[in-house]
Image: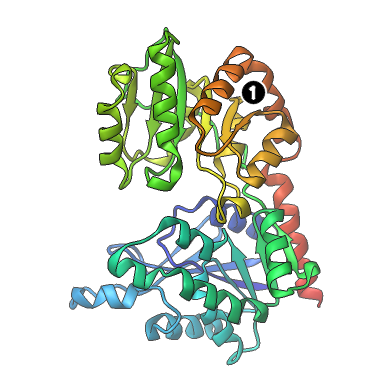
């Protein structure tokens, strides 16, 4: 079976797509991937046994590249490239990774004898509503448009992939999509990849303080205000803590304002800005507890981030907000504690509780991830779905 994946961003990196490609190639499938080209990248190259095809980059008329690379289903460059690849490589399955390009897979199916899969990395319409894009970006990434696209095109796919049971249930209930055609392939960690081999030399962490770590984007919906306020109160009361934030984003200025309001954090907090992903396992290995403060909402209640499994893989306890899937999983694996979304006092209490017995939580989470919540287990659902699709 020959598979053509479609991704609206550059590749690599993308943890989920990388994992799926490796598993499918190892299982004997011929895998191709169509994605954006940020400029200067090869139009075609091999990546771990898969062939990567990038939208051609125009060197002479660079001003046209913004339009050529723009990933929407009506873009004639993307459409033409998709059909060309289907014909050239006798593609059997088009596996699309992003809702904006989902209609293009449906369009291709009307013109070529291919089966189509929509891989829901998240509840995309809900994500747009929570992210609250502004101005022109809101016109492009609009919640109502995304919901319309999902409603119109999702039922036309031969198979769907969800990252968590809660999103599978949402699709079943909202659109009446048959449960038997939805595979749950979660963001479980690939254990052999998430190892702290690359030390980050541009930082000196205190040895006499307990490191509380946040990794991720700095945006208003991430719940970092709860962490900063809670940490300020704990440090001012004498707790030997240090807050390490690894990531960057539009929220950096707001964090600076919060810091000015949090005098106890002076000298007890560091924000790295964006760092290459290869350093993330090292940062996790240096921490005492990892926090996931993004609160419960229509987006987080139907998705699960990679990071909770990554933290547990390295034996680190977790303190997380009470999004539905997060609460279910953290309680199941006994890998940490859950606090009420937006509740600074509850965050403080749960953080202190975890820090009293970090090894108990850390080892419990690590054991379950090594036995169950890892990519070697997740890939079985992916391969089963493809096997069923090929025989249907």
Residue 229 percent location from the top left of the image: 40, 27
Residue nearest the viewer, comparing 52 with 337: 337
Residue depicted at x 37% and y 17%: 205
Residue 41 percent location from the top left of the image: 33, 62
Residue nearest the viewer, comparing 336 with 386: 336
Residue 138 visible in the picture: yes
Q: Quadrant of the C terminus?
A: bottom right
Residue depicted at x 78% and y 67%: 179
Q: Residue furthest bottom?
A: 111
Question: Dividing the picture into quarters, in which one does residue 217 lie?
Answer: top left
Is the residue 375 above or below the residue 242 in the image?
below
- Judge from the rendering whether residue 254 lies leftward or rightward of residue 165; answer left or right: left
Q: State the colouring used for the structure image.
A: rainbow
Residue 199 visible in the picture: no
Numbered disc 1: secondary structure: helix
Residue placed under numbered mark 1 in the picture: 362
- Judge from the rendering whether residue 177 lies leftward or rightward of residue 257; answer left or right: right
């Amino acid at each position: 079976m020959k598979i053509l994946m479609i991704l609206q961003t550059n590749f690599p990196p993308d943890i989920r797509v990388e994992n799926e490609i490796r598993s499918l190639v190892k299982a004997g499938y011929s895998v191709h991937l169509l994605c954006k080209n940020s400029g200067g990248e090869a139009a075609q190259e091999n990546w771990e046994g898969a062939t990567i095809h990038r939208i051609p980059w125009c060197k002479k008329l660079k001003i046209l590249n913004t339009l050529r690379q723009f990933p929407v289903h009506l873009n004639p460059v993307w459409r033409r490239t998709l059909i060309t690849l289907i014909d050239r490589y006798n593609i059997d399955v088009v596996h699309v990774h992003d809702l904006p390009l989902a209609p293009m897979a449906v369009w291709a199916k009307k013109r070529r004898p291919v089966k189509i899969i929509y891989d829901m990395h998240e509840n995309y319409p809900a994500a747009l509503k929570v992210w609250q894009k502004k101005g022109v970006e809101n016109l492009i990434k609009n919640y109502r448009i995304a919901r319309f696209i999902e409603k119109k095109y999702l039922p036309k796919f031969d198979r769907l992939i969800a990252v968590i049971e809660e999103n599978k249930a949402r699709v079943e209930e909202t659109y009446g999509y048959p449960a038997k055609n939805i595979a749950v392939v979660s963001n479980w960690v690939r254990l052999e990849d998430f190892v702290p081999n690359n030390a980050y030399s541009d930082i000196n962490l205190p040895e006499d303080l307990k490191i509380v770590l946040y990794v991720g984007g700095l945006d208003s919906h991430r719940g970092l205000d709860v962490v900063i306020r809670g940490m300020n109160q704990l440090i001012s009361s004498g707790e030997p803590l240090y807050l390490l934030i690894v990531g960057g984003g539009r929220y950096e200025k707001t964090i600076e304002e919060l810091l000015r309001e949090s005098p106890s954090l002076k000298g007890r907090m560091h924000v790295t800005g964006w760092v290459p992903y290869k350093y993330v396992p090292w940062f996790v290995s240096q921490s005492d507890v990892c926090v996931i403060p993004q609160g419960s909402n229509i987006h987080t209640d139907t998705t699960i981030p990679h990071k909770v499994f990554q933290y547990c893989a390295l034996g680190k306890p977790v303190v997380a907000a009470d999004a539905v899937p997060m609460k279910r999983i953290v309680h199941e694996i006994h890998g940490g504690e859950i606090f009420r979304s937006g509740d600074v006092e509850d965050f403080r209490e749960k953080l202190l509780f975890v820090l009293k017995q970090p090894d108990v939580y850390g080892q419990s989470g690590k054991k379950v991830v090594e036995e169950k919540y890892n990519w070697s287990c997740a890939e079985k659902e992916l391969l089963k779905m493809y096997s069923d699709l090929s025989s249907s």
